[in-house]
Each structure stands twice: as structure tokens, then as C-alpha cells.
Amino acid sequence: MADVTIAQPGLNEGGVDSLARYLKVFAGETITAFERASVTNGRHIVRSIANGKSAQFPVFGRATAAYLKPGKSLDDLRKNIPGAEKIIQIDGLLTTSQMIADLDEALTHFDIRGEYSRQMGEALAQAADGAVLAEAAKMVVADKENITGLGKGEVLAHTIKAEDIGVTQNMGLELVKMLLDVKTKMSNNYVPANDRYVFMTPTGVNALVASLVAINHDYGAVATITEGNVLRVAGFDIIETPHLTMGGAEKNEGVIQGDGHVFPAEYKDKTVFIAMHRTAVGTVKLKDLALERARRAEYQSDMLVASYAMGHGGLRPEAAFMGTIEASV
């Protein structure tokens, strides 16, 4: 009996890998999930390096000006611009993987690969977000300037009545006071007015939304919901972030350098928002998000792997602030 011709929808013409086209779908779905799930993507500095274990970010102080008296030399007045550097190290290779048994895939009545790829993309995205936000928080808590005179961030610690904590008008009004305070402090630190973001818990965001009428009555048109349902308050784009204090991926023996990205424990349960300029935190990218499939014949399974090699660190203390709200005693 002649061999039966069986369709191979995953096979490229002239190829031998019957899953080649499926991998492209998996890769696209994972990258899309990563981009959609990440809240810090595009909202902080990212620098790619071809090789090496770290990247250097130069920091410059401010120049000064002085009147020149006739007959005097500029040499008597000149002051050097102070400088320093910030170094961000590559953490290691962050990975997520799943193995799908042939039988399980055949038995399912839904797209199991699509769901797995979405979950893997989100896992990496949240790990990256958590690391960026943890580094911003650590920089604020450290309470140090890069160079004397450039300024630094601050923890704004407010208290309200216990019954007002939640999606309430009073909490929304308190948050507006805090954001106006942050706006003033950032401006005093010469932080550019554009590219300012506030990453906020869902409770905080919805408290602001619940208070929009009262906010605009008391403060004028300081809060708006723009096209695409982006909430803007006091010049900040408000980004809803359920994983605000989650921190980065748990540190293990795979971290080749650094201490990981742990959110400061003292503030983990009471932080409502992190406000920062795009330049406040940086990411160094050695190996971009990569996807691959490995056939595990001994298990009659396919293994799907997503990974990247990055590092994260604070750059500008003067451009990051943190807000906490607790119940008053």
C-alpha cells in the first residue's frame, strides 16, 4: 500500500521542520503579550549593549555663571562642572518555559500554545516592570543625590481615616494633594515637565476616578480622562499597576551579579504610587526577548522557552518620588 500523504500546515516549503511556522506564531504571541502587559515599556530609558556585563551612564552637575569685572580673567571665575557615573549591571538570563505533551495538545479543544505564550510573555513583562519599579523605590528610600545640588526624591507619607482608605472621594482628593506636591518638587529639581508618569495601584486609580468631579471643582481642570481612557492628573499620566510593589523575579543562583530587585519591605504594603520621569530609571539590555522551541522526543513533547538578559537600576534620584497612605491613629 502506498504511503498516505498527510497535510503538514506547519511545514515551510522545502523545509524539514514540521513546526517551523508554529514557532513564529508562538514568538509573535509572546512578544505581543510582553509589550501589552508591560507598563514600564517605553516609559523609562532602555540601552542595548552588544557585549559586556554592564553599561555606564554619565551624570553631570550644573554650570555656574558669574559677572566678569573689567581687567579680571575668566580663569578666576571658572568652576568645573561636577561629574559622576551610574553603572547598571546585567542580572543574568531570565527565563520562562513550558513543555507541552503531544497527547495533551491533541486532546485539548482550545489553543493551548496561544494561552501558554500569553502567560509566558506576561511573566517576563511583570518581572521587568517589578524590577524597574523596585529600583525606583530603592533610589527614593536611599535618600541620596547623584551630585550635591541636583536634588533627590522623597517619600510622601500621608494618613487618612481608616474608613476613607479605598475607592473613596476622600482618598482621591488626598492623592491629588500628593501629586500636586510631587509636581512642585519635581519642578524645583528641574525635572522636565514632559514624560512624567505615575504608576499607581488600582485602588488609587479608581479613587481618583471616583473623585474627578470633586477634584475639578476644588482645583480646576487638574484631572482629565483622555482618549484611550488614560487618566491624567497634575501633568502626570496615571498608569494602573496591580504589581506596583511586587519587585523583580525572585533572586536565585541564576543571578550572576547584583542583589536582585527587591521592593523595600518597609513600604511594600503601604505604597500607593511611584512617580517618576522617563529618565529616572534605566534598563540595560544584553539579550533581547528571544523565543525558541526544542523537541523533547523522550517525553513526546515540545518545550517552549522565552528569555532575556537585562539589568535595571536607578539613574536620577531627583526625578523619582513615592507616595504612601496609611490609616491615621
Image (spheres, rainbow, N blue to C red):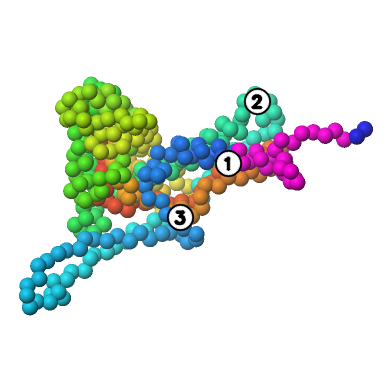
For the N terminus, give its image quadrant.
top right
- Name the residue nearer the viewer: 52 or 3: 3
Residue at left offset 7%, top offset 72%: 69
For the C terminus, give its image quadrant.
top left
Residue denoted by label 2? 108
Q: Main secondary structure of the magenta part?
A: loop
Place of residue 106 in the rendered image (x, y in percent of width and height, measured from the top left): 69, 28
Residue denoted by label 1? 27
Name the side, left or right, on which 15 lies relative to 4.
left
- The residue tagged with tag 1: helix, strand or loop? helix
Q: Nearer the viewer, mark 3 or mark 2?
A: 3
Instruction: Give how far apart the Cα atoms at labels 1 and 2 are.
Output: 21 Å
Looking at numbered disc 1 in the image, what kind of residue is underneath it? Ala
Residue denoted by label 3? 48
**Which stretch did the figure color magenta?**
3-25
* Circle nearer the N terminus (1, 2): 1
Instruction: Give how far apart the Cα atoms at labels 3 and 2 are.
Output: 40 Å
* Circle nearer the N terminus (3, 1): 1
Badge 1: residue crowd in 10 Å (few <14, some 14–19, many ≥20): many
Looking at numbered disc 2 in the image, what kind of residue is underneath it? Thr
Badge 2: residue crowd in 10 Å (few <14, some 14–19, many ≥20): few
Instruction: Give how far apart the Cα atoms at labels 3 and 1 are.
Output: 21 Å
Place of residue 2 in the rendered image (x, y in percent of width and height, measured from the top left): 91, 34
